Image (cartoon, rainbow, N blue to C red):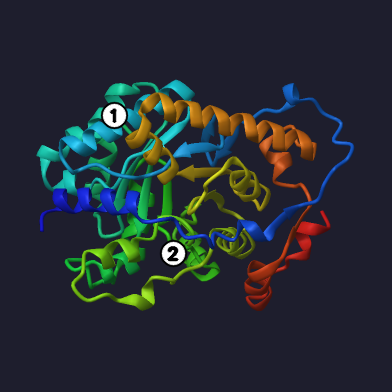
Amino acid sequence: MNRARRKLEHIQHALLLEQEGANGFDDIVFVHQSLPGIRTNDVKLHTTLGELSLSSPLFINAMTGGGGQATLDINKGLAEAAKACGIAMSVGSQMAAVKDASERPSFEIVRQVNPNGLIFANIGSEATVDEAKRAVEMVEANGLQIHLNVVQELVMPEGDRDFTGALARIERIVRDVGVPVIVKEVGFGISKETALQLVNVGVKLIDVGGFGGTNFARIENKRREEMISYFNDWGISTAASIVEVLQGAPSVAVIASGGIRTAFDAAKAIALGANAVGVARPFLQELVGRGMESVVALIEAWHTDLVRLMTALGAKTIEELQSVPLVIRGDTHHWLTERGFDTKAYSRR
């Protein structure tokens, strides 16, 4: 099967399959502040990712491209929403367009629509430095995502089976590509051990891409004749993965993604230490179901909710939200305790 057809099948299954519930954020509880001492007008949503400056911690995370007109239309709508709201956006994997120039327009449309926006290119860990540079050039990107998707590839009928040399390729890209590099998982989470490996080769930005959102094992199983069921529930929840990365490799800046369904989830992710929050499926659903204006309205509603939540917590800035007290309970507490992480550090700050 060609890449374009596979891209369309991924979109179709992503829209039809329900998101997993176990993103871990139900286990995160804020400590109420009866005297927050601030006004809603005091709250500022600006944040930073390394050398990148974002007007909002929310951004439209990688979804699609390389599937012909259908994916061009999706990326056009998402780029219009990103421009209207002043938020960043990542395109989906550009490997199809790197290998087949006829697929470039489905990615190039994003920069055409949003000439001054913050845009992230996207390639797989199998890419060479030259391929990474072509992906960046294609969308005049401000940063580059390198996605890690071993489990998806193993379940994918036509997927890769050789994952040797990935870390060395990432190191070369970080050194030579010329823009900030974000390494991201696609729904199975980043562990402390992986984060340390990435830091050791120069990675400064990690998108945890945790379990709890769009499940690419389930999507690929829909495309198989014989299901590989043991990967359907595989991974580290988004909440747990944020702690794994930040306590395991505290020098990195973290993006939270994977099952971020509401502004409440986003606020909890930031309070755990994330600098930004990537959202995909909720925005795709709005775009396909109701149109671009509905995506804009949803983003604006999330911004309003974030301001309310930060006011209730007495946090004027994203940096202050990263320091509010919270309690970690349930399965997330059990996971983190068994893995040797300090959960009390969050409740006693």
Residue located at (24% from left, 42% from top): 65
Disc 2 secondary structure class: loop
Which sits in the foreground, 196 or 100? 100
Q: Which mark is residue 92?
A: none
The residue that disc 2 covers is: 188
Whether residue 157 sits left or right of residue 229 in the image: it is left
Q: Which residue is drawn at 82% across and 53% down?
A: 349
Residue 310 in view here? yes
Would you identify the image quadrant in which residue 148 lies? bottom left
Crowding at mark 1 (Cα within 10 Å: few <14, some 14-19, many 20+): many
The image shows residue 257 at horizontal and vertical percentages of 49, 51
| Above or below 192: residue 25 | above
Q: Which of 277 and 171 is in front in this view?
A: 277
| Amino acid type of the residue that numbered disc 2 sits on in the rendered structure | Phe
Q: In this view, does 55 lie above or below 152?
A: above
Q: Give the quadrant of residue 337.
A: bottom right
Question: Total label count?
Answer: 2
> Where the N terminus falls, by quadrant?
bottom left
Of 23 and 120, nearer the camera is 23
Q: Please, what secondary structure does the residue beneath circle 1 have?
A: helix
Vertical order, 192 against 258 (above or below): below
Task: Report the residue at 44% width, 21% height from top.
Answer: 84
Q: Position of residue 267 (x, y in %)?
A: 64, 44
Q: Quadrant of residue 214?
A: bottom left
- Horizontal side of 27 relative to 56 (left or right) equals right
The amino acid sitting under disc 1 is Lys
For disc 1, the marked residue is: 76
Q: Is residue 13 left or right of residue 53?
A: left
Please rate how many residues cluster around mark 2, counting C-alpha atoms within 10 Å: few if below 14, some from 14 to 19, many from 20. Answer: many
